Image (tube, grey):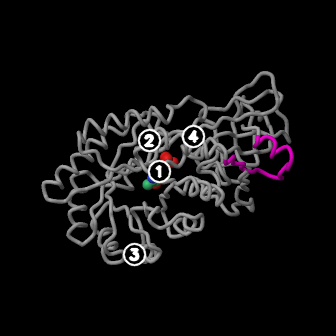
Amino acid sequence: MTDRIMNFLRDTRPEGPCLVVDLEVVRENYIRFAKAMPDSRIFYAVKANPAPEILSLLAGLGSNFDCASVQEIDMALAAGATPDRISFGNTIKKERDVAAAHARGVTMYAVDCEAEVDKIARSAPGARVYCRILCDGDGAEWALSRKFGCEPAMAIDVLDHAHRSGLVAYGVSFHVGSQQKNPRAWDQALASSAEIFRTLSYRGIELKMVNLGGGFATRYLEDIPEEGEYGHEINESIRAHFGNRIPETIIEPGRGMVGNAGVIKTEVILVSQKAQDDIRWVYLDIGKFNGLAETMDEAIRYPITSSRGGDATPCILAGPTCDSVDVMYEKKPYPLPVSLEIGDELFIGGTGAYTTTYSAIAFNGFPPLASYVI
Ligand SMILES: *Cc1c(COP(=O)(O)O)cnc(C)c1O
């Protein structure tokens, strides 16, 4: 937790669970990405945290934006981004949303099949398209499934089709899975990308860009590679596979840009030891439905601190709603101080990404996660 967040919580004592994001940390993250990958343009993945203050800060620093909907495009524009700094990166778009993006001046779109290319050819004529290829997501803590992307051989046909439809066949994209702690994970997809570039070049279509996606990790409980290590490994792979025909590259960090900038303050509602369990249950005023959705399958394990000292024993950690899936850590219980009491505050670190946006509006009447950006 940064001093700024600590002071904010001490001075304002907000009621209820809340996320506090320190913009200074976001600024440092942006600068680190820019230094680690100086040849790549940065497209912040807006879905990780679309708070207007974050988008304005990043727009001012020169960031571009990866948007998944017209609403996200409007948020990026409102933050000061120009349409040439926006990519419509969702491979699943209504055609009228493509038209709306085109009307706003957006010229870059993701696709992964010919039907999506056809929508763009009709509703955003002349646009640049890049084709997303599949990635196995090995090594990622929050893998992205087969929902997006196509096999590299199909990508060749999709881009060829785009070219013949009057669009600019611009490049290839992929996502190696979120919270990807292996900096070598980009290598295989870069090899496939280079192959697609070569094959299309023989056909007279010169692709220009590789979109390296997101995946850059944020620190939870375990150490993670530094931005520089990702940059180094990715650069090596690009050189190995593209030789002296280095493409333009872009990166789309979401989690890595904002994850470590946020802390959630939560309150212990109940500590109970039931006869049927030999373990304490700790119930918080935050759970899967108001911010901690990424604890699904216990995928993301957040660092949690309290002001209590002394010994810690494992607890089952659960949220406040009347739904039995609203349990964060049970398979692998979470150690918390023995002296923990009802009414204590806990601080959940690394929560700047994928918390507010995954929060339900009023399940069981609980409000969505409050957010303060300082
Ligand atoms: C979600 C998403 C990202 C951001 O991923 P992180 O792992 O949070 O960095 C980047 N690109 C696309 C297309 C995405 O859907």
Q: Quadrant of residue 99?
A: bottom left
Q: Residues within 10 Å of mark 3 (few under 14, many from 20)?
A: some
Which residue carries the number 3 mark?
A: 95
Q: Are marks 2 and 3 in contact (CB under 8 Å)?
A: no
Q: Is residue 67 left or right of residue 135?
A: right
Q: Residue at x 69, y 39 (%)?
A: 317
Q: Nearer the viewer, mark 4 or mark 2?
A: 2
Residue 291, above or below 84: above
Asked if marks 4 and 3 touch (Cβ < 8 Å), the reply is no
Q: Earlier in the sequence, mark 1 or mark 3?
A: 1
Q: Which mark is residue 87?
A: none
Q: Which mark is residue 37?
A: 2
In the rendered structure, which disc, 4 or 1, sits on the residue that comes first in sequence?
1
Residue 181 falls left or right of residue 356: left
Is 279 one of the magenta-colored residues?
Answer: no
Residue named by callout 4 = 300
Amino acid type at mark 1:
Ile
> In terms of sequence position, does the residue under pointer 4 or pointer 2 come before the other?
2
Please provide the residue range marked out in magenta.
4-23
Residue, x 78% and y 28% (percent of image)? Answer: 337
Looking at the rendered structure, the kind of residue marked 4 is: Ile
Using the numbered discs, state the Cα–Cα distance from disc 4 to disc 3 in whole angstroms: 35 Å
173 and 282: which is toward the camera:
173
Asked whether disc 1 touches disc 2, contact meaning CB atoms under 8 Å apart, the reply is yes
Q: Position of residue 362 (x, y in %)?
A: 70, 63
CA distance for labels 4 and 1: 25 Å
Earlier residue among tags 1 and 2: 2
Instruction: Name the residue tied to disc 1.
Output: 42
> How far from the left and from the top, in percent, is residue 89?
42, 60
